[in-house]
Amino acid sequence: MRLCPGPVRVGGVDLSNHLILAAGVLGTTGASLQRMLREGAGGVVSKSIGPIPISGHKGPCVQVYDHYVLNAMGLPNPSQAFQNEMAPLSGKPVIVSIFGGNPEEFATVASWFTDSAAAFELNVSCPHAKGYGTQIGTDPAMVEACTRAVKQTADLPVWVKLTPNVTDITTIGKAAEDGGADAIVAVNTVKAMRINTELKRPVLGYGTGGLSGPAIFPVALRCVWELYDAVSVPIIGCGGVSNADEVIEMMMAGAAAVEIGTAVVNGSEVFRQIADALYGEDGESPADIVGCAHA
Amino acid sequence: MHEIASVAVEILEMYDETPSVKTITFSPSFDIRPGQFCMVWVPGVDEVPMGFSSENSISVQQVGEATNALCSLAPGDKIGIRGPLGNGFSPKGRVLAIAGGVGAAPLLPLAERGMADTFILGARTEAELPFRNSLDACTDLLIATDDGTAGYHGFVTGVLADLDPTAYDTICVCGPEMMMKNVLRDLFTAGCAEKSQLSLVRYMKCGVGICGSCSMDPDGICVCREGPVIAGHRLLSEKSEFGRYARDASGQRSDGPGH
């Protein structure tokens, strides 16, 4: 099955296709984000930017396996200095991922990018940074407050990226919607770990980390499926998508667009490859596909 | 997608290459192309990128917490190796290698496989010249030292000036970034920058082209995946950060060349 090409507008952002570069992947510099747009991404999400510069966890930060990747980067980011990376990207579909430890910090970080971002994505879902991410994103009241704080700071669309590491993701999705979210991104990585048996230690310097890649696609798909029945804002599917058929599958579960991250390990040309396989002039209308499996 | 996870290796030998560089050999060995690198995991400390100096060795300069910890280990200890990573050199025809200090490490396997016709090795002093005997045995070795204690008195560019670089088909370079910048400038002047391949260093976290820490301006070259060996002509633009600035672990820019 293919989709007919055409303008894509999701969560208040005009995209050149349904494939968005996920946060934390090749998004540390403006040049890298620009390159991914050149390589065929319909939109790009930056590395998550927080209130203070962070160097990140001690390595190993990433381990690649046959069907999944484990990472514990520890939210490394240049903080306000990221303004310099964003300056040449104004007007492009660049969504700035931001994080903080409370609503005020989210608002402060957002205020730095109101002139350059096309939208914000709130990282309330990183599973490996104390005081941030999942520690915010498992508390519905906190998610709602952080979303509202950014909405009040910036006249820009706000996407909220959820963690799958909760009992009921719809509760968090509804909290984001109540806070004014323009879209929900589902999901961030699944908390996980491996141990090197010869070294008798976790394979990540931080110990535990986040699982991504093909292994989590069924988890992400299920989250999108549940959210589609629970919220009325668009959902952006994220988690293990690595080919055009999985993009369609995500859309049938309810995703209006998808984010692609770990598949970049196969090469940055992955966006062009998926887009080539996804679109055809005789394809189906995306509007007929999104959520169709719920019928 | 295929597995590139840390493999536990046992340290076999550790010996001083120079007063500041230690070679560490380990088992098992890896199937490498000269110029490829690995992420070296010192358990409980950190993980750092390092070029393979052979299929079962790295040569370490103590520059920080992880390399200090690495050099304090002993034969029998275990470390993790993730690799081989990156592209390595692609030598063809007559090959000139140019190395500065510990930058000779990823060029050593090239020479030992008989692929370097001429090898310019530079260091601050005679004692700081790594791999001198090994290189002397497998290539036409030309020496430069900053203080004149061995070979040409001055930088590798002084030795290069007495050669005809256009007589070579491939020019492989690894060393401090300012040295490489000067070499590239001279090759450009000689009209053969397009023959050069430079092994670069940028701060790296993932080593597999996902995280973006090692991305270079202005084109977003991903050093860990597309490199670490980058064609010289891609670094000639005035907008290139090469030789001008680099980013740290947080992604903040700091002026001055990379390492």
Image (tube, grey):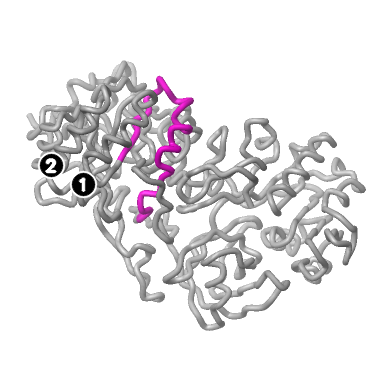
Query: Looking at the picture, which amino acid does disc 1 mark?
Result: Thr
Instruction: Give the percent coordinates (x, y) of residue A122.
Output: 26, 38
Question: Looking at the image, how many numbered discs can be counted on the residues?
Answer: 2
The numbered mark 1 sits on a residue in which chain? A
Q: Which mark is residue A172?
A: 2
Q: Is residue B141 visible?
A: no
State if disc 2 and disc 1 touch (CB < 8 Å): yes
Label 1, residues with CA under 10 Å away: few <14, some 14-19, many ≥20: many
The residues colored magenta run: A71-98
Report the side of A209 relative to B108 (left or right).
left
Image point (35%, 41%), residue name:
A48
Q: Quadrant of residue A66?
A: bottom left
Nearer the observer, A215 or B185 = B185
Q: On screen, A235 above or below B229?
A: above
Residue wearing tag 1: A163
The numbered mark 2 sits on a residue in which chain? A
Q: Which sits earlier in the primary sequence, circle 1 or circle 2?
A: 1
Q: On screen, A285 above or below B4?
A: above
Image point (40%, 54%), residue name:
A56
Q: Is residue B132 visible?
A: yes
Report the side of B73 relative to B174 (left or right).
left
- Whether the magenta-drawn stretch holds residue A78 is answered as yes
Q: Quadrant of residue A235?
A: top left
* Marks 1 and 2 share the same chain: yes
Report the side of B130 relative to A106 (left or right).
right
Q: Residue furthest right?
A: B162
- Under circle 1, the secondary element is loop
